[in-house]
Image: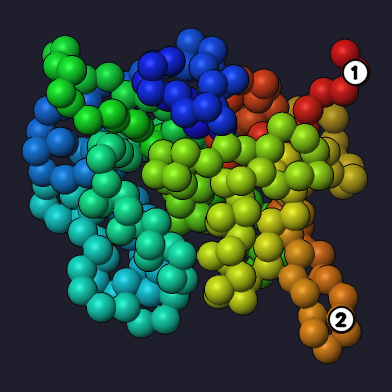
Amino acid sequence: MKPRPSSKSLSPKTIHLGLLALCVISSAISVHAAKTGKVVIRENVTASKRNELANRLRSISGLANLGFNSDGVLVLGEGSNGGSQGARALLDQAVNGDKVIIIEDASARSDVAFCRVVPGRWLSDNDTRLPAFVVLIDFTDFRQILGDEKARAAFDVGWGFLHELDHVVTDSIDSDEQGSLGECENHINAMRRELGLPLRADYFFTESSLKTDPNFGTKLVRLPFELYNPRTTRKQRYWLIWDAASVGGLVAKHQTAAVRSAPDRRN
């Protein structure tokens, strides 16, 4: 789900999400961001993490010259070499769009599971300013993922960022039903398909069947991916596993994120 700055800007299909904006904490954005570019990475993101994100976006999109300039602005560069056309189109829409998107390091924050997007607020009121959003990335969460190599290639910091970017750029929404992907992940899966990667099979993660020592307080969860094998005409399932007690996302009723826990059906 993607929160909007105010109920006035809600499209018909997302009016039911209006109350969600009350459940998130807005991040302040400097005016400098809007003057230099539409997608800007904040100074609190270290050079190594900037490179990590840029490298993954280059690999996914095929944009060999993509990167962040000295002002932190995302620059796509010229030409492409393979990659996902859908990812290139999404990134192009973002850097040339009518919204400001700020990337912030949220590593080790308990309220961020991998990535989430929240509405931003300007430091001074000005009705002519563009709508602003902050993409929070917990880089440390992505380093705690275990599982099949092919599934890990289909879910990393680049894919997490693109998921949140799609919310902002296309106004896509997530699923609220287990077993369903939702509009946003359908868009991202189309990009994975272009790269021959496994497709995400569910928006929600569920409890893993692996047993752990209860004394350690871990809670292993898993997320499914599937890849069609034309030779066998069957789908091969791959899993990602992580400790939700460390990564977060267990309490996700109002959380906007690239992953969420399965809805509680007990009520």
Q: Dots 2 and 1: beta carbons under 8 Å?
A: no
Q: In this view, does 205 lie above or below 118?
A: below
Colouring rule applied to residues: rainbow
Which residue type does callout 1 highlight? Answer: Arg
Instruction: Report how far apart the C-alphas of labels 2 and 1 lie in the structure.
Output: 37 Å
Residue at 28% x, 37% y is 99
Please indicate, yes or no, whether residue 150 appears anywhere in the rendered image: yes
Q: Name the residue under label 2.
A: 233
Mark closer to the chain start, 2 or 1: 2
* SS for dot 1: loop
| Residue 46 drawn at (x, y percent) | 27, 46
Left or right: 148 with respect to 44? Answer: right
Q: Mark 1 points at which residue?
A: 266
Residue at 66% x, 44% y is 182
Q: Quadrant of the N terminus?
A: top right
Which residue type does callout 2 highlight? Answer: Thr
| Residue 199 drawn at (x, y percent) | 68, 62
